[in-house]
Amino acid sequence: MVDKDKFYLVGVMGWPVMHSRSPMMHNYWMQQQGISGTYVFLEIKPGALEGALRALHPLGFSGCNLTIPHKLDAMEIVDEVDDTAKKIGAISCVIVKNDGTLLGTNNDWLGFIGNLKHQQPTWNADAGPCTVIGAGGGGRAVVYGLLREGAREIRLVNRTESKAAKIASDLGKGVTVYPWKERHSLLEGAATVVNVTNQGMVGEPALDINLDKLSPDALAADIIYTPLVSPFLAAASERQNKTVNGLGMLLHQGPPAWKKWFGLEPIVTEELEKMMVESISED
């Protein structure tokens, strides 16, 4: 599927986007897989997404990843949306077909689940209730992934309750929505707790959550990776809970994108993980 004589172009569209570690990861894989090409930052302002996506084919791009704030808007722009992206309601990856049409899919859920299994091999989605805090595009992907893995009870809580209710409606049974004020009590008995808000990210306030009711056996996960240890994960770690940060979610959503772009599956190596950790730690 890969032409050794061709120079391949892929990238990540977002606003802002220059903080992303995606180019470091994908360019590492370009060398690993012996491909001539590059993965670039594509800083696209809100409102300019359609023109940017339509330019991918004439510019020779194989596809791109999408990050904030473009994942939802792309649903109305691409020519085809696969079933996974339809169910999640957001696109994280665009594939440029040979005829120039654009296919949208979502690999975020694969990154989330792949990361959990890599970091905690004994993790099981149906070990007990899963509490998910947040209902943005990341929240939709996480809930979808947990349901796909067999979670039977998902407690979903978000400041704007209607957004959580939409996820519950779209993704079906097993998801129960609770008021924001009940978030602390929703930790009781939960086997997995996931923060999918941006609270705790560099420049943002910490997640307002009291962990007193968190079971000692519960796994605490965060989808952000700047910082590598969010205040939420730090507090859970102090209680001796197992924790998983969001860096692996980025790493593990990459190979599925490569399979769709190039027909190849790059390897998440220890060397790559170390490079990414060191880069983030330098900030």
Image (spheres, grey):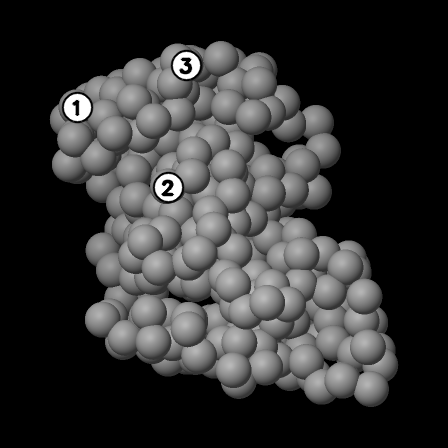
Q: Secondary structure at mark 3?
A: loop
Amino acid type assigned to the residue bearing label 1 in the image: Pro
Pointer 3: residues within 10 angstroms few (<14), some, or many (20+)? some
Instruction: Kindly indicate whether the residue at mark 1 contacts the one at mark 3 (C-beta within 8 angstroms).
Output: no
Whole-number angstrom distance, CA of label 3 to CA of label 1: 17 Å
Residue 43 in the figure: left or right of residue 282: left
Q: Quadrant of the N terminus?
A: bottom right
Task: Give percent across and percent down for residue 59.
Answer: 53, 85
**Which amino acid lies under the numbered mark 2 shown in the image of this protein?**
Gly
The percent position of residue 209, horizontal first and vertical second, equals: 26, 36
Mark 2 neighbour density, 10 Å: few (under 14) some (14–19) many (20 or more)? many
Which residue is found at the position 57% from the left and 18% from the top?
Answer: 150
Q: Which residue is located at x 66 percent, y 52 percent?
A: 256
Q: Which mark is residue 89?
A: 2
- Side (left or right) of 63 relative to 53: right
What residue type is disc 3 on? Gly
Query: Hey, which quadrant is residue 159 in on the image?
Result: top left
Image quadrant occupied by the C terminus: bottom left
Answer above or below: position of 94 versus 113. Answer: below
Which of discs 2 and 1 lies nearer the camera? The answer is 2
Label located before the other in sequence (2 or 3): 2
Nearest the viewer among 34 and 275 is 34
The residue drawn where x is 23% and y is 55% is 205
Q: Is residue 222 above or below residue 174?
A: below
Of marks 3 and 1, the one in the foreground: 3
Give SS at disc 2.
loop
Marks 2 and 1, Cα distance to the nearest angstrom?
22 Å
**Furthest residue toward front:** 99
Q: Is residue 74 left or right of residue 244?
A: left
The residue at 42%/73% (across/down) is 54
Question: Which residue is labeled 1 in the image?
Answer: 179
Circle 3 residue:
174
